[in-house]
């Protein structure tokens, strides 16, 4: 949850706002309390949509839907204002981790819990389908595990199609891997699409893997239409239920009511040991949980580490080696990329030795000094954003091989790629070159742009936007562990305010994304264990799975 800022009101109707839970194309969602102290989730329509009759109609339809739905597995409407702006409605606040976060943290669900979970979610779908509404974006991130059972959220209304296409890759409604084939191919879409998404959601829950694999939007959706769902190692009975839900022909899929019957669930869902462990999922490491970002700074509870302004070049006094979390605030126009001589040239490759070039004639390192409102360093650690300015193309160092003299250097592929995009780190210095103490972890707040040559480095990891258009995460030894597998001169990576990490080409067309749009308040973190994640303060919504 994010703290309120100057753009947020203190009250909506009779509700006192406590913090911001999320933000999307239609509006913002707040945690609020009634005069009697009852917590509620209050959704307020965006100011820019108040005069949009189409948007208002959809907003009112969502409220009408919520008013008629009565289910143990959906949050109930408790209040609304649809006549006088600002337009808003309030529902019960459902605390708890998402199904996605629970599986990422504790692993796949056991078969008996999976059956009863499937039955519970099908019962929730049945309650909204009988009202003539379907969810349209069912996925593990839209299932909250509450103390009384799983809850479906964000149902009954399409996403704002008027929102900028910069927030997603592809035009189909839903999230890749959970979109029904008929939606992708332009066929008639109805409640059966929810059943497909339900089956895919359970597939993730029992495997811990994306149901149709990972990769670009187009590749995943293609597999959703033409491929087979990943059920390797799944209990045969549960696999049979999932396979029925994800039939290509929607007419062959069971209804939610029939799914409940087929599950023959007998386990006590909320008291199941695996469910109880899921309820205990913590969203942040202890040290990160101690920090609350407020107005570009960091406020700490008593005895927490003290924040201070970043070091300038050559100032390392007082820094403690290998400790702390660095918070990188949004771009403010003073983090411009630089690349030595040829921005289009591929960078040198990890693990190579000098190729006979002479020692650097003069290498200057640009330390980006940003004010406290833009960059706060916690735990006495300096953020290392490096841009190399090399006065000699054929210079070399013990850590990098210059591109002009690296003809025999072998490129290291981050992962198999049909495009042939490869991972090759930029010619930037290591901490040992400069005597700089790197942070254990980095937290990046949106909006933030990774231009060509921009590097974010921790003790164990280095994230680089390469000249070939590939965003790559390396470990300390120079081995590539994850890459966007994109290619093209002029590509940039943007971590957007909607929580989506997107690679754009030079024409600002999206090439790849994390598909985490709608995760308002999310930050991008490079963790101490080498994993890179996008997370809100309640859930991990995306990760590179590179922890070691």
Image: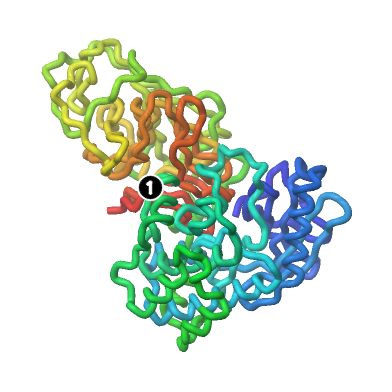
Residue at numbered disc 1: 215
Q: Residue furthest left?
A: 356
Q: Considering only vertical position in the picture, is 192 above or below 301?
A: below
Q: Nearer the viewer, residue 336 or 159?
A: 159
| Residue 348 position by quadrant | top left
| Residue 36 position by quadrant | bottom right
Residue shown at the point (28%, 44%) measured from the top left: 481
Q: Secondary structure at mark 1?
A: loop
Crowdedness of circle 1 by 10 Å Cα count: few (<14), some, many (20+)? Answer: some
Q: Position of residue 410 (x, y in %)?
A: 17, 30
Residue shown at the point (34%, 67%) measured from the top left: 231
Q: Residue furthest bottom?
A: 266
Judged left or right of residue 471, residue 172 is: right
Judged left or right of residue 259, residue 392 is: left
Q: Nearer the viewer, residue 437 or 183?
A: 183
Query: How many numbered circles does the render carry?
Result: 1
Q: Considering only vertical position in the picture, is 138 above or below 437?
A: below
Q: Position of residue 106 (x, y in %)?
A: 38, 68
Q: Considering only vertical position in the picture, is 39 above or below 347?
A: below
Q: Position of residue 169 (x, y in %)?
A: 50, 42
Q: Residue furthest right?
A: 84
Judged left or right of residue 174, residue 341 is: left
What coloring was used for the rendering?
Answer: rainbow
């Amino acid at each position: 949850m994010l703290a309120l800022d100057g753009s947020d009101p203190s009250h909506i109707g009779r509700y006192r706002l406590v913090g911001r839970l999320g933000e999307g194309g239609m509006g913002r969602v707040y945690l609020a309390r009634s005069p009697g102290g009852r917590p509620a989730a209050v959704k307020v329509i965006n100011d820019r949509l108040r005069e949009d009759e189409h948007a208002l109609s959809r907003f009112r339809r969502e409220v009408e839907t919520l008013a008629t739905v009565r289910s143990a597995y959906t949050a109930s409407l408790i209040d609304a204002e649809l006549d006088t702006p600002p337009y808003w409605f309030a529902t019960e606040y459902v605390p708890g981790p998402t199904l996605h976060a629970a599986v990422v943290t504790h692993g796949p669900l056991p078969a008996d819990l999976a059956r009863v979970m499937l039955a519970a979610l099908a019962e929730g779908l049945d309650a909204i389908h009988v009202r003539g509404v379907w969810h349209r974006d069912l996925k593990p991130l839209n299932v909250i595990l509450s103390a009384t059972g799983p809850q479906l959220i964000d149902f009954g209304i399409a996403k704002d199609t008027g929102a900028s296409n910069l927030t997603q890759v592809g035009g189909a409604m839903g999230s890749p891997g959970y979109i029904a084939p008929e939606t992708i191919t332009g066929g008639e879409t109805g409640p059966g699409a929810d059943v497909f998404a339900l089956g895919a959601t359970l597939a993730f829950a029992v495997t811990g893997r994306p149901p149709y694999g990972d990769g670009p939007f187009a590749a995943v959706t293609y597999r959703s239409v033409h491929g087979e769902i990943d059920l390797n190692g799944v209990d045969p009975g549960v696999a049979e239920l999932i396979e029925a839900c994800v039939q290509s022909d929607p007419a062959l899929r069971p209804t939610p009511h029939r799914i409940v019957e087929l599950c023959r669930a007998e386990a006590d869902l909320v008291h199941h040991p695996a469910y109880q462990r899921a309820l205990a999922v913590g969203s942040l490491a202890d040290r990160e949980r101690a920090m609350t970002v407020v107005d570009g700074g960091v406020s700490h509870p008593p005895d927490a580490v003290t924040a201070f302004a970043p070091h300038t070049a050559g100032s390392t006094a007082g820094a403690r080696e290998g400790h702390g979390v660095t918070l990188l605030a949004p771009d403010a126009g003073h983090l411009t990329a630089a690349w030595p001589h040829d921005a289009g040239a591929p960078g040198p490759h990890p693990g190579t030795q000098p190729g006979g070039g002479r020692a650097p004639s003069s290498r200057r390192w640009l330390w980006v000094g940003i004010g406290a409102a833009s960059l706060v360093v916690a735990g006495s650690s300096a953020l290392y954003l490096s841009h190399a300015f090399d006065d000699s193309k054929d210079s070399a160092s013990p850590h990098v091989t210059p591109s002009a003299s690296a003809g025999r250097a072998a490129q290291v592929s981050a992962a198999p790629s049909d495009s042939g995009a490869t991972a090759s780190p930029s010619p930037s210095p290591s901490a040992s070159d400069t005597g700089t103490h790197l942070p254990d972890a980095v937290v990046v707040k949106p909006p933030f742009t990774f231009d060509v040559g921009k590097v974010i480095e921790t003790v164990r990891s280095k994230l680089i936007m390469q000249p070939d258009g590939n965003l790559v995460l390396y470990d300390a030894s120079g081995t590539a562990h994850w890459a966007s597998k994109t290619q093209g001169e002029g590509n940039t990576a943007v971590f957007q305010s909607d929580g989506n990490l997107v690679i754009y080409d030079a024409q600002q067309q999206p090439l790849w994304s994390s598909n985490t749009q709608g995760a308002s308040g999310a930050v991008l973190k490079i963790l101490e264990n080498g994993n890179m994640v996008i997370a809100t303060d309640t859930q991990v919504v995306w990760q590179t799975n590179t922890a070691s």
